[in-house]
Amino acid sequence: MLKRFDAVVIGDANIDLIVAGLNQIPQPGQEVFVDNMTMHIGGGAALFAISLAKLGLHVAFKGVLGNDGYGQYVREQFTQHGIDTILIETSQTSNTGITIAINPEKDRSFISYAGSNRELDISKLDLKEVAQGKHVHITGYRGRENHDAFIQAARKLKELGVTLSCDVGWDDSGEWFKGVFDLMGCFDVFLMNETEACHYTGLDNIDESLRFMANYCKHIVVKLGSQGAIAMKDGLQTFHSAYQVDAVDTTGAGDSFNAGYLFGYLSGQDVETCLKYGNACGGMSVSASGGSTGTPDFNRLNRFIRQFADQAKVRLEVI
């Protein structure tokens, strides 16, 4: 079928209100002044979509926004970045989600309202509409709650001729549902962070976790935070160290990494280059306040990589 987009991104979009310099929670009747408050696009899928669009891909977003000013703001920001909003639904019952992030420069705390994001139901997607993308990136996995719907959607999308990626995300239920391993086999690229990988596998060592997951998926990527990232593809394990930068705000760093990695994947690059792109996008993201402010276009990405080339450490291992 006709592919209108390089990628379709499915998931959450909301407003991030970032509060800097809040040293104490105000008591009843008390007013506290802070250093700054800024508003940004939030939601892992939204931040990923913006980062991917900045790198030059034609991206469409599939999610649900409220019929309110914040929803309009998100749409306008997407449009400014060249993201097609035709697939976005408008809720008639919920407002656009909001997260208040307190002290992002230190130990971050959050107050969140999911809002219209709760109405995105993977089982009710028009999959032929979504398959207008050559590639589809899916977020919002909630373990046992929507596992079957994820499997069915992924299998149908593969039949419709798309490549698929998924960032499994944190399991709020705490169950760490083992069905995730069946899900992995439905995707061309499966991403998570180190803590999530160890929780799901029950193993403390990331190398052992990767070997275990390789039994279920041919291409797994694990983010290691300030240490970098590691991937297992077709039995070859590749590690690439992080670029050392001054971190201002780590919001969206993992989503920016995902965008860099998948940009490389969709451009036909090898795993080492994909990791290089991912780490660079993550490093540039944390260098600025706001989840998508510091993410680069392709030219800035290449300049950054050349600037920090002497920091790169790569390790390959055949398993």
Image: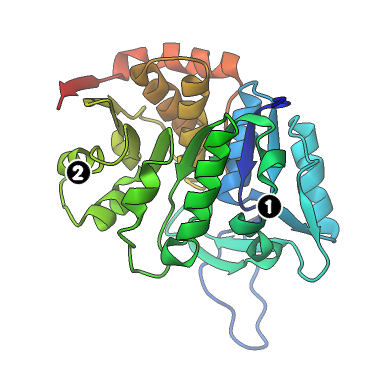
> What x and y, as percent, mark residue 48?
57, 39
Residue at the far bottom in the pictured view: 28
Q: Is residue 101 shown to the viewer in this render?
A: yes
How many numbered circles does the render carry? 2
Q: What crowding class fits label 2: few (fewer than 14 Cα within 10 Å), some (14-19), or many (20 or more)?
A: some
Query: Picture quarter containing residue 179?
Result: bottom left
Left or right? Give the position of 198 relative to 21: left
- Relative to 274, say whether 165 is above or below: below
Q: Is residue 146 left or right of residue 42?
A: left
Above or below, 221 against 203 in this view is above
Q: How is the image coloured?
A: rainbow
Task: Kindly identify which residue carries mark 2.
Answer: 212
Q: Residues within 10 Å of mark 1 (few under 14, many from 20)?
A: few
The image shows residue 50 at horizontal and vertical percentages of 64, 36
> How many angstroms separate mark 2 from mark 1 (CA)?
43 Å
Residue positioned 58% across, 36% down in the render = 136
Q: Is residue 288 visible?
A: no
Which residue in the structure is indicated by mark 1?
38
Q: Which residue occupies the foreground of this view, 155 or 150? A: 155
Q: Secondary structure at mark 1?
A: strand
Give the camera-side residue of 245 and 149. 149
Residue 163 higher or lower than 137, as above or below: above
Q: The C terminus is located in which quarter?
A: top left
Q: Nearer the viewer, mark 2 or mark 1?
A: 2
> Could you tell me which residue is drawn at 28 percent across and 41 percent down?
216
Residue 298 figure quarter: top right
Q: What's the amino acid at mark 1?
A: Thr
Identity of the residue drawn at 44% across and 32% down: 283
In the figure, is residue 275 to the left or right of 301?
A: left
